[in-house]
Image (cartoon, rainbow, N blue to C red):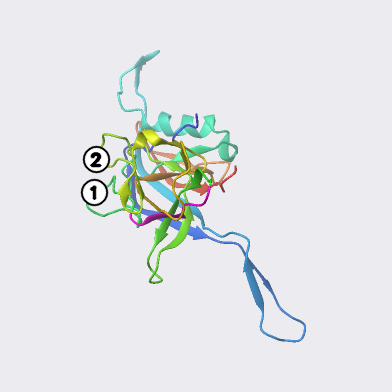
Amino acid sequence: MIARLPIPTGLTWNSRKTPRFSTVTQYPVSGARPVSFSTSPFPSWEWELTWEFLRDQGLDTVNSISSAQPEFSQLQDFFLAMNGSNGRFIYDPAANSIPIEDNFVTQNLSGTMVNGYSGSTEYGQTAYQLYRSSKVTGSLVEVEAIDALSAVCQPFSATPFHLYLDNVLVDPSTYTLGDYPLVVTFGSAPAVGKTITWTGVYAYIAKFGEDKIDLSQFMYRLWELQSMKIEQVPLGF
């Protein structure tokens, strides 16, 4: 089981989010039009978070913890447990209530996936990768492969996962979900040509962007972290 990055109290604006692609461009010697091709069909995301305060554990006497909110230790120890940028974890914006991402409905922080389109069913196929999609081009386009479901996306929560075939809700007992990447597997192959859509909240497989974090103590038992960089790890990590 992969650990989830804790997002303790004290997170502040601004939080940065950056999509990244990898494109190779060839320039012909003849001076003709250059040719480009992408080595990454979907974006790889980067984030930068800032904490304006992290409360430390207070020790009134030796081994006597007086603070019930050790955010400083929580974040520091998770970084140490990940061995810096070496470890892998789930970065879950929705579950940790950080600023709403643009793929969520803005009525609440836990949000709901919109336009979860994953193609059409094929003969004899039972397993399908799930994608986030968009209509920005005028038609449904898969813009991002999904790593995992968010911790807030539970069967009886306000934001459950739902799967549809031709807009008809599918009985959850007829399929299973597997993470890293997020794949739905039907117990038996559905009829050919059914459009697969879904709703839910998703998370990312990520790692720290650097092998160090700069924790600064600005008051007694109060710390700040001006920059924590996080990078999405490509599927198949």
Single out the mark in the foreground, 1 or 2: 2
Q: Earlier in the sequence, mark 1 or mark 2?
A: 1
What is the magenta range?
A: 114-123
| Numbered tag placed on residue 164 in the rendering | none
Horizontal side, residue 26 vs residue 107: left or right: right
Q: CA distance from mark 1 to mark 2?
A: 10 Å
Q: Residues within 10 Å of mark 2 (few under 14, many from 20)?
A: few
Residue at (66% x, 76% y) in the render? 35
Q: Amino acid at mark 2?
A: Ala
Residue 196 percent coordinates (x, y) = 41, 52
Quarter of the rendering containing residue 135: bottom left
Q: Position of residue 235 (x, y in %)?
A: 56, 46
Residues packed near mark 1 inside 10 Å, few (<14), some (14 to 19) or many (20 plus): few
Q: State yes or no: residue 116 in magenta.
A: yes
Residue, disc 1: 108
Q: Quadrant of residue 202?
A: top left
Q: Using residue 18 as the reference point, say whether residue 211 is left or right of it.
A: right
Amino acid type indicated by mark 1: Asn
Q: Residue furthest right?
A: 29
**Marks 1,2: beta carbons within 8 A:** yes
Q: Secondary structure at mark 1?
A: loop
Q: Which circle marks residue 158 in the picture?
A: 2
Q: Is residue 62 left or right of residue 112?
A: right
Determine the secondary structure under disc 2.
loop
Of residues 114 and 44, the one nearer the viewer is: 114
The image shows residue 198, relative to residue 41, as above or below, that is above
